[in-house]
Image (cartoon, rainbow, N blue to C red):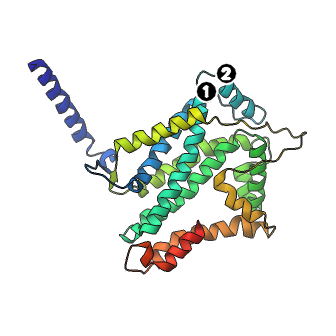
Amino acid sequence: MAVSLERRNSTANFLYWIWNELDRTIFTAIKFSFPSRFVSPFGFLGMLTFIMFVTLGLTGALLMFYYEPIMTRSWDSVQFINDEVPFGFHIRNLHYHGSNAMVMLAILHMYYQYFSGRYKIRNEILWVTGVILGTVTILEAFTGYDVIFSERAELAISIAASLTNSIPVAGPMIRDLAFGAGFHDFVLRFYAQHVFILPLVMLGLMAVHFPRFLVFDVPMVMAICGAMCLAGGVFPVDLGFKFEPTVPPGITVPEWYLTGLYAFLRTQYDKFLTGVLWPALFILALLVTPFIDRYKKFSWKDRPWITAIGITGI
């Protein structure tokens, strides 16, 4: 009994020493709060989005062992992961469903903060960085499902390149920078953006976006990770059809978070207006919301114009 108590004290002293040593590092620049009583699940949406980001980093790193960012080999390498690599099918499912979960959680987190008026508590910087972070999150998901180079990916890439090219003055330069000179090297460029450039931007934004006290709840983390694992085992992800330049592509649909943009494009108005300017105005409207919201109260019922704009945005 005495030996057990001594070991427990030694472990506690060791952990206390580590915490004191880390106190002067960036690790404890953000204080973690573990609530002792019930907190609304909506309050954990930001933290859960970050957990999904970490999960995607882990599963993505495992997929990198076998994925080949080459135009003629990208789809085949994903098929090899899916069919031949032990547990590759499950890892890919986890990565795909995790990316959708992260986008969904980020959107829910943004609208919860919007309708609850949390940005009014001197949180303008957190709000602005959060909106930018949400936009980058969608770009990260977009580049991820494009690197497989299926028929759906080819359609999405063609539309994205066309929209980028429609931007006045700088459009062609941005297109060449992001997509390359043609199909021969865009897969490698998208891969670099997906695994390095965009995650680096997201980490930089997160360093500014995180509040001083991050509410962390272990049961909520276990619940969202369990839900993702359950979805990864029950709902398999379709590979789609490999893109063949000589074969006419079939009917494809975009990911759910891009359906609004595709709906704009189907109106047949000017491509730059519907595909670039309208979404940009929507993002700009979200960015300036804290600076134009002059209502004194926080409830969405007491902020009719802001609430109306938010509902229109949905």
Q: Is residue 64 visible?
A: no
Which residue is rendered at x = 53% and y = 69% of the image? Answer: 286
Which residue is rendered at x = 57% and y = 49% of the image? Answer: 198
Question: Is 266 positioned to the left or the right of 108 in the image?
Answer: right
Name the residue tied to disc 2: 84
Which quadrant is the C terminus positioned in?
bottom right
Q: Nearer the viewer, residue 50 or 298?
A: 298
Q: Position of residue 124 (x, y in %)?
A: 42, 68
Q: Amino acid at mark 2?
A: Glu
Name the residue tied to disc 1: 88
Q: Position of residue 92 (x, y in %)?
A: 61, 33
Question: Is 305 positioned to the left or the right of 120 in the image?
Answer: right
Secondary structure beneath label 2: loop
Question: Is 311 positioned to the left or the right of 273 in the image?
Answer: left
Which residue is rendered at x = 36% and y = 57% of the image? Answer: 211
Estimate the spatial distance between the alpha carbons at disc 1 and disc 2, rounded to whole Å: 7 Å
Q: Amino acid at mark 1?
A: Gly
Q: Is residue 272 above or below residue 293?
A: above
| Residue at the left extreme, as displayed | 2
Secondary structure beneath label 1: helix
Q: Is residue 275 visible?
A: yes
Question: Is 59 positioned to the left or the right of 151 in the image?
Answer: left
Q: Are marks 1 and 2 in contact (CB under 8 Å)?
A: yes
Q: Nearer the viewer, residue 235 or 13?
A: 235
